[in-house]
Image (spheres, rainbow, N blue to C red):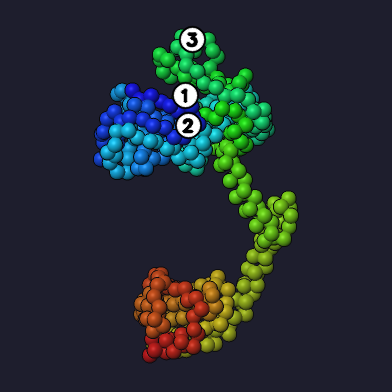
Amino acid sequence: MTERLYWLDPYLQQFTATVTAFTEHNGQPAVILDRTAFYPTGGGQPDDRGTLNGIPVLEVVEREADGAILHVLARPLEAREVEGRIDWERRFDHMQQHTGQHILSQAFLRITGAQTVSFHLGEELVTIDLDRVGFPPEAIEAVEELANRVVMENREVWTRFVEAEEAEGLGLRRPPKREGRIRIVEVADFDRSACGGTHVRRTGEVGPIKIVKLERRGNETRVTFLCGGRALRDYRRKHRLLLESAGSLSVGEGMLPEAIRTLQAELKETRKALGALQELYLELALPELERKVQPAPFGGVLIHLWPRLPSGLLPRLARRLSEGRPRLVILASGGADGLLIVACGPGVPLDAREVLQRILRQLGREGGGGRPDYAQAPLPHGDLQALHRALSEAMG
Ligand SMILES: [Zn+2]
């Protein structure tokens, strides 16, 4: 069994050790040491990174059979005596999140009676699952308040080993999962849990604890939260987003929700007015367009181009002009949201998709699609002169 230096001193960043076995893990070289400061994946906490004699440690796993800790390496290690270095930034982050989790779980238990049933520390997110649902916002605030008060009181955090029988009388937050010797982590006068992870030595080091999301999952609630450096980075990012949003609407950040509501109401009104105007335009434009229909053997042909037209209007015009009549209708508009439409009324011996593709080929463009009686293609910044020429080519 490997001696776990991280239990004695979680602040140990450098150590020397002797290789006791050279082995492999999933095809990668791996070594077992007589002692290590590398934490292996377990108890919801991810493994450490770092180096052994300068060789990157890719993964640290505990072998279930004998409790040996495997250091999976980027390339083979030859020496027997090694110097290990822990990626401290990563580890300290894990210590902040993990200690924060103990505090938050106890705060939930005290304020709401909810028990933590699992814990996951991810690359970005940290979550606990609680054994109940339906937390009012005031309860969540009270939990945050209590957890952060315990942080600011800068209480001591210590660990010790006890025998399982002794653990029963200690009032642990949850009954321990294993037998024999049990490691107890205690936040002074606040929380006592069985845990094999790495923790900070005083709660002040955890930094702010912030709950960011609650999700119901069956009869449980998943709570996403951030501690310390992660909480600060999240605050910084959100503050920047808020300032940007408020700045783009030229209001103070406190006025943002109201400004958005006003904009939404205005947008709704504007859309309504635009719809009414488009309807009006349609009624005015249709007789004019009817007069432009040219005779054709199967009925008639109508071609019309607009330098600019709201893109929603063109399909409505095309349908109204081709509906129930043996008529080929080709409409296009220019501008950034330019559009080309081919519509074939009943009795027109043409496939709208083929006509569309013929025109697009003349323009050196592609794309679009539709049905035999209606096809369209986006034509952003279409050159209407070129389109005129392409149409006469395609129709000729
Ligand atoms: Zn822990």
User: Where residue 62 appears, x then y in whole percent?
Assistant: 35, 29
Instruction: State if disc 1 and disc 2 touch (CB < 8 Å).
Output: yes
User: Where residue 76 appears, x then y in whole percent?
Assistant: 28, 41
Q: Closer to us: mark 3 or mark 1?
A: 1
| Amino acid bearing label 2 | Leu
Q: State the image quarter where residue 327 is shown.
A: bottom left
- The answer to whether residue 181 shows anywhere in this view is yes
Decide: is 355 above or below 92: below
What residue sits right under mark 1 in the picture?
A: 8
What residue sits right under mark 2 in the picture?
A: 12
User: Where residue 104 appears, x then y in whole percent?
Assistant: 58, 29
Decide: is 136 above or below 158: below
Q: CA distance from mark 2 to mark 3?
A: 29 Å
Instruction: State if disc 1 and disc 3 touch (CB < 8 Å).
Output: no
Q: Which sits earlier in the primary sequence, circle 2 or circle 3?
A: 2
Q: Residues within 10 Å of mark 3 (few under 14, many from 20)?
A: few
Q: CA distance from mark 2 to mark 1?
A: 9 Å
SS at mark 1? Answer: helix
What residue sits right under mark 3 in the picture?
A: 166
| Amino acid bearing label 1 | Leu
Q: Residue at x 29, y 39 (%)?
A: 77
Please indicate whether residue 137 sits to the left or right of residue 252 in the image. left
Q: Which sits earlier in the primary sequence, circle 3 or circle 1?
A: 1
Q: Residues within 10 Å of mark 2 (few under 14, many from 20)?
A: some
